[in-house]
Amino acid sequence: MRVLLVEDHVELAETVATGLRREGMAVDLAFDGHDALAHLALTDYDVLVLDRDLPGVHGDEICRSLVAEGRNGRILMLTAAGSIEDRVGGLSLGADDYLPKPFAFAELVARVRALGRRSGAPLPTALVHGDLRVDPANRLATRNGRRLALSPKEFAVLEYLLGAEGRIVSAEELLQRVWDENADPFTTTVKVTIRRLRAKLGEPPLIETVSRGGYRI
């Protein structure tokens, strides 16, 4: 899942981003409204976590513009104002969800994941291929009943490949959807992650490499 976190409090933004990355999400950061719009012009995000009171361009204006453009990504609005009127106001702008500050990190993760599941074509609650079963909500992957000890990034790659339903997924697409903007496009990180994932999945092999194409299950 690709997430843009827009928050002008740098320390809070970096702390939250680190936590979301540990949960297997690809997170980019923007610290003001202009920076947010620049990111959104380049990348289609699954979820936008948007602080309402931003310098430069107000969060309300960003929300309005995205809704007017008909973007598929979902918007979770954050604000220090937690009154009912503020929540109604944020949702009336077109935000999909609203979370007042301060918030519990576990609740933020749950809401981002819930919105991420709504941002594209709906996926089943469990992704199954033969004896492989992936439960995205509980971050659990098993093969032949055996739990797989996957890193957050390995889990995210496996989830994305299963969600592609047999479609060939290029390394570039994986880098775009599973890693954040800090990933080097010339790196071998996708290849290395696939190799580790294959080893953990065991036999018979599930991930096929398609010459000049990418990978598929």
Image: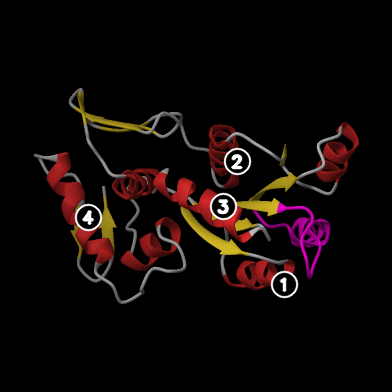
Identify residue for label 4.
Answer: 194
Q: State how far apart marks 4 and 1 are (Cα).
A: 36 Å
Location of residue 61 in the rendering, given as x and y in whole percent from the top left corner: 83, 61
Residue under numbered circle 1:
34
Instruction: Judge from the rendering whether residue 170 lies leftward or rightward of residue 147; answer left or right.
Output: right
Q: Amino acid at mark 1?
A: His
Contact, CB < 8 Å: mark 2 with mark 3? yes
The figure's colour scheme reads secondary structure
Circle nearer the N terminus (2, 3): 3
Of callouts 1 and 3, which one flags the residue occurring earlier in the amino acid sequence? 1
Q: Quadrant of residue 204?
A: top left
Q: Tell me the residue that label 2 is attached to.
A: 115
Q: Position of residue 39 (x, y in %)?
A: 61, 69
Question: Tag 3: Cα neighbours inside 10 Å, few (<14), some, or many (≥20)?
Answer: many
Q: Please provide percent x and percent y for residue 127.
A: 37, 34
Q: Amino acid at mark 2?
A: Leu
The CA distance from mark 1 to mark 2 is: 24 Å
The answer to whether the residues at label 2 and label 4 have Cβ atoms under 8 Å apart is no
Residue that sits furthest to the right in the current view: 85
The residue pinned by badge 3 equals 46
Magenta residues, as a range?
Answer: 51-72
